[in-house]
Image (tube, helix red, strand yellow):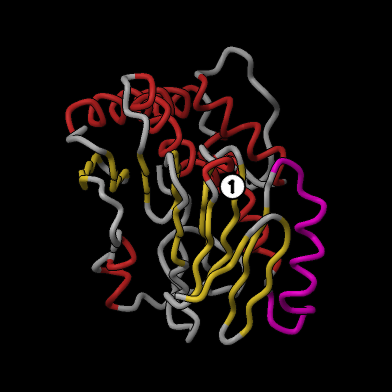
Amino acid sequence: MKRGANKKRRPLSYRERTYRQAGQTGLLSTFVRMVETDLHILAPLDVEDEALRLVAGVRSQVEGYIRHNPVFRHSLRPLPPDATAPAVVREMLEAGRLAGVGPMAAVAGAIAEAVGCGLQKSGVEDLIVENGGDIFTARTRECTVAVFAGESPLSGRVGIRLAPEMMPCGVCCSSGTVGHSLSLGTADAVVVVAPSTATADAAATRIGNEVRRGRGGLGQALEMVKDLSDISGAVIIRDQQIGAWGEVELVRL
């Protein structure tokens, strides 16, 4: 269920996933890997068995839908709603519609959210689920998410502070210079905060596609952000430049 591939710089720190450094959260780390899905879960207790069950279930739903609807996997444009589809697929279709991209742009965020909501239903009230840089967060207290921006000098030096009343929410990142997921732009990092993690993921992809050298840079992309519905805010980093829009509180790390 990969979102696509293009050649990008892959710094050693990215390959080793050091962006997953969790700081002092007071929560236990659990790692769950299944095919392309690679989750880092922070929770008050070991949730590995339940998380594995949830991942297997949600992946089965997405893969089954793709087998019967192969266009779902490859489309770079929004697809029509499908009331008969599994919930996770409907979330991806809606996220793609809102952001103006194909539904697979939301797959990592949708899986993180599905697993997070499933863990909440099992009684886990304080947790973070990260899937390849896309995060479902449902903390009971304020937290800060650091922004990893590849080789930008701002990478790891800027964070987004989340107040308890903002959560649960999604915090998702797209990059045109780091990682394997498809991006048509040149941003080192585009981070979107939204109530829906699937929507945050799709919106980050859409905004990232708009960050092009010689085309108005960050300013033009930030103007486009204003037209996207159902997101709380966005942060864009390219080289030494940073821009933000919406309800995002930036902090120096």
Crowd band around label 1 with a 10 angstrom C-alpha radius: few (<14), some (14–19), many (20+): many
Q: Viewer-proximal residue, 220 or 6?
A: 220
- Which amino acid, by three-letter code, is at mark 1? Ala
Where does the N terminus fall, quadrant-wise?
top left
In the picture shown, does residue 94 fall above or below 220?
Answer: above
Q: Viewer-proximal residue, 84 or 247?
A: 247
- Measuring 29% from the left and 62% from the top, which residue is drawn there? 23
In the picture shown, does residue 16 fall above or below 241?
Answer: above
Q: Position of residue 139 (x, y in %)?
A: 42, 41
Q: Quadrant of residue 247?
A: bottom right
Where does the C terminus fall, quadrant-wise?
bottom left
Residue 222 is inside the magenta segment? yes
- Measuring 31% from the left and 31% from the top, which residue is drawn there? 55
Q: Position of residue 130 (x, y in %)?
A: 37, 48
Q: Quadrant of residue 143?
A: bottom left
Q: Position of residue 200 (x, y in %)?
A: 59, 47
Q: Quadrant of residue 53?
A: top left
Q: Is residue 244 left or right of residue 240?
A: right
Which residues are the magenta region? Answer: 212-230
Residue under label 1: 200
- Measuring 28% from the left and 64% from the top, which residue is drawn there? 17
Judged from this view, the residue extending furthest toward the top is: 84
